[in-house]
Image (cartoon, rainbow, N blue to C red):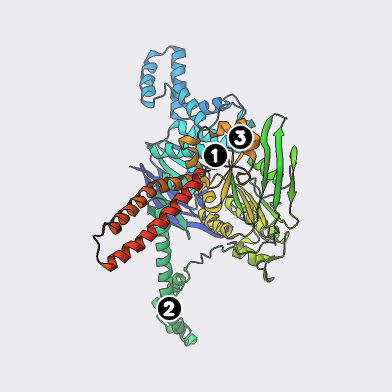
Amino acid sequence: MNYLSVENLTYHWGDIRLFNDISFGINEGQKVALVARNGTGKTTLLKILRGEMEADKGRIVFNDKIRVGMLEQNPYFEGNKTIIEQVIGIENEISNTIKEYEKAVANGDSDIMGELIERMDALNAWDYEQRIRQILGQLKISDFERQINTLSGGQQKRVALAALLISEPDFIILDEPTNHLDLEIIDWLEEYLTKSRMTLLMVTHDRYFLDRVCNHIFELDNQQIFQYEGNYSYFLEKRQQRLETSDAEADKARNLLRKEHDWMIRQPQARGSKAQYRIDAYYELKQKAEKRREERQLELQFTHSRLGNKVVDAYNISKSFDGIHNIVNDFSYKFAKGEKVGIVGNNGSGKTTLLNMLTGSLSPDKGHIETGDTVVTGYYRQEGIVVDEEKTVLEVITDIAENVSISASGKSMTAPQFLRYFLFPNEMHHVRVNKLSGGEKKRLYLLTVLVRNPNFLILDEPTNDLDILTLNVLEEYLIGFGGTIIIVSHDRFFVDKIVDHIFVRNGSGNIQDFPGNYSEWIAYSKLPENKPASSDKKSNPKESARPARQHERKMSYKEHKELESINAEMPEVEKRKKEIEGKLSSGEISNPDEIRQLSEEYQIVSERLDELEMRWLELSEI
């Protein structure tokens, strides 16, 4: 069954055409992700589908037999209702049926009650309030009587998500559903949507989420929609093939264009006598030849200021609010040059507080922090860009630097060159900041951090609102970054790709240093033998707060898996060693070549067994 049909949709933003005559359909059961660069029209397309904006032309048809639900990236609630009042009071078929039923009961209208009872049964509406409380609980919303207008943006996002899921629509449109969600909640939402029969259309930068939930990818590129039937991994493969084919066609057209160009410029005074069809074909060919992608990657190879051996040293720092709630408890650590560390933990566990203390914008209650003389800090804050939004894109950069150093030899770029390098074309240089998309603002803000050539880079939720293609480029830059990096992010894919190890915040002020990435920590924490570890940590917070390198630590997830591998391999190697010993000592082998081969293998097997035993002893002592 077709749920949504879009035909010949076109929209212009000023002189820029975001999409042109795009057509697509979404059928029952499809879980579709919309992928595109920032500023190419993702959010605009969703707003048009939601009825918040009008297209220049085209037709949008939703199946009138289905219920459609939508989640905005930044939902807005009016009034001062409590959470439970807001969620129960949201207009949907179930809540409206319940209201009609309660009214019929109050009026004693038995005929209408009979009809409504059937509808209540069909909608499974009798336990509606209990389902509301269960879903709110899964989304870590427990204070049901708290007023909506006192919640943070992230908390309001979760309330809106709860209301959407509770209403159980047939088709839902989600704009960045994982923003502001903890990992535990994202895991739950992944499983919920994967098992659900709801049809989805979503915009998300969370590639793990996208890969596991979606079975179709729609790419908005070059004003057109390209469709891929598969998950994100399949999309990457097929997209590359599409781009290579497109470039080959453009190259072929360019070669033919040279010949046609020669024909066009010969005897221009006789142009009127030339065949008109060939002139028209020339301009069509020229347009096709110019379509070769200028998808220049953001190869961020900017230099950073020289960094000495001392970066930032934290000595027994602690921080609490109201003298009760411990945010950081007796934390000590010396950050090393070139180190890449991630900080993970639930919302409210104090990740940003720790960053603010490390950068000096917040003082610890106890302990102290020492910063190296050569440290140049670049701090990307999750609240985003803080500039006069009446300024132009170019003014934002030139306020910081007219020229940008890009190499140790003194090579530099002008501010306009720098912007073009980061995919802000000339026509956007004089666009005011308040006209940019959310993702473009975040990209511009990132430039204001990098343009200062920091050697100590702190990124607090940098992936929110950035498109996937920009994220890929940012990751490559961070992997090659020679300075020290601290990253706070709920984006598992991003953290997995960048960091050497992670600090795990458990909400009680303690910080555990885990020598692995995000996914390895999750797998490690689920191992049965590691379940009680958190209670031990709480009993001796001072010990748990020390970095792993300074005291006897627990076995990492990688080491745990390595030990399992060794335990499986050692018996096989030992068995083979005994087999060779038996053959060599049997006296039954007379062929000198066979004896030599067995002797060489025996030497290799013996050395391997020694290596395994030595490593087994090392791991067993952890």
Q: How many angstroms separate mark 1 from mark 2 (CA)? A: 51 Å
- Please state which of residues 166 and 608 is positioned toward the viewer in this rendering: 608
Q: Earlier in the sequence, mark 1 or mark 2?
A: 1
Q: Label 2, on which residue?
A: 255
Q: Earlier in the sequence, mark 2 or mark 3?
A: 2
- Please state which of residues 376 and 87 is positioned toward the viewer in this rendering: 376
Q: Earlier in the sequence, mark 1 or mark 3?
A: 1
Q: Label 3, on which residue?
A: 507
What is the number of the mark on residue 181?
1
Whole-percent x and y of residue 487?
60, 49
The reply to whether residue 78 is in sight is: no
Whole-percent x and y of residue 129?
48, 23
Q: Residues within 10 Å of mark 2 (few under 14, many from 20)?
A: few
Secondary structure category for the residue under label 3: loop
**1 or 3: mark nearer the eye:** 3
Q: How many angstroms separate mark 2 from mark 3 (CA)? A: 63 Å
Tell me which amino acid carries mark 1. Leu
Whole-percent x and y of residue 573?
36, 52
What is the number of the mark on residue 561?
none
Which quadrant is the N terminus positioned in? top left
Tell me which amino acid carries mark 2. Asn
- Please state which of residues 344 and 203 is positioned toward the viewer in this rendering: 344
Q: Are marks 1 and 2 in contact (CB under 8 Å)?
A: no
